[in-house]
Amino acid sequence: MTAEVSPAGLEAVSLVELAVRRLRSEILSGALAPGERLVEEQLRARFGTSRAPLREALRLLGQQGLVDHLPRRGVRVAELSPRDIEELFTLRDALERFAVHCALGAGDGADPAGLAALAAQVDAMDAAARSGDALAQDAAHRAFHTGLVALAGHRHLFEVYEPVILKLQLYMATNMRREADEHPPDSGPARHRRLHDAVASGDLQVVLAELTAHGARTYLAPELGSG
């Protein structure tokens, strides 16, 4: 028997999705800063939504690593210390280097389907950068890096990698945004195209050199400069 969904239920789901998208966009764009408190009453008035969909949206954003729920202190945009940022990016670097060792170390080259998926994400990043769709660019950026690690075909590695990139997504988006402020909009996609091309070459040393030069946190100096 197929479960029926009432119009009211569909409306509630839609309101949750809309609130998630709007808050996610504001967080990743920097409109809501790391550590900023999210006051439920203000958000309800601004979004024109009721308490239940907003709370569900905040719960989902907490699962995505974008907000923190603090006992007796409400909800705030997730914030990492400079040390946390550096440690997580260093861990991301190590996991990605291990992944390409797994993918290319045998000398057989990377999986063609996986390479095609990486190329598609670079194209998506480039199209989003040119159209000014920062949220779509951020999504393609994360998908590129998870796709890079997926080339290893190593399930346990991927399970370790996913929470790391989840915690870093706000700072990855910040790095890309600041890069676009200082350079042409296609600079970020171009960096990732070079990394894709290195992986496609099948030369492990070329890939490792490109990873070293990748500049994943080059534009995060304010966050990394203290603490």
Image: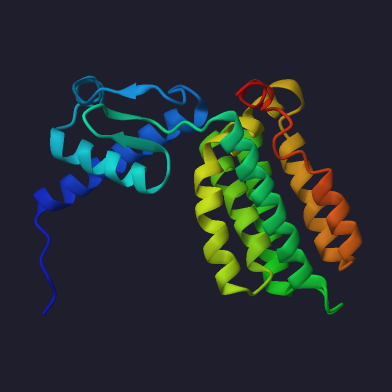
32 left or right, relative to 134: left
Can residue 143 be seen by looking at this rendering? yes
41 left or right, relative to 88: left
Q: Which quarter of the rendered picture does the C terminus lie within?
A: top right
Q: Which quarter of the rendered picture does the N terminus lie within?
A: bottom left
- Against 144, is 50 above or below? above
Closer to us: 57 or 123: 57
- The residue furthest front is 227
The figure's colour scheme reads rainbow
207 left or right, relative to 99: right
Residue 210 drawn at (x, y percent): 85, 50
Q: Residue at coordinates 50% horizontally, 44% vertically from top-left?
A: 167
Residue 151 drawn at (x, y percent): 68, 69
Can residue 110 be seen by looking at this rendering? no
Q: Residue at coordinates 70% horizontally, 35% vertically from top-left?
A: 217
Residue 95 drawn at (x, y percent): 67, 58
Residue 159 drawn at (x, y percent): 52, 65
Closer to us: 181 or 217: 217
Q: Residue at coordinates 71% horizontally, 30% vertically from top-left?
A: 185
Closer to us: 35 or 110: 35
Quarter of image, res 121: bottom right
Quarter of image, res 174: top right
- Against 178, is 141 above or below? below
Q: How many marks?
A: 0
Closer to us: 57 or 126: 57
97 left or right, relative to 170: right
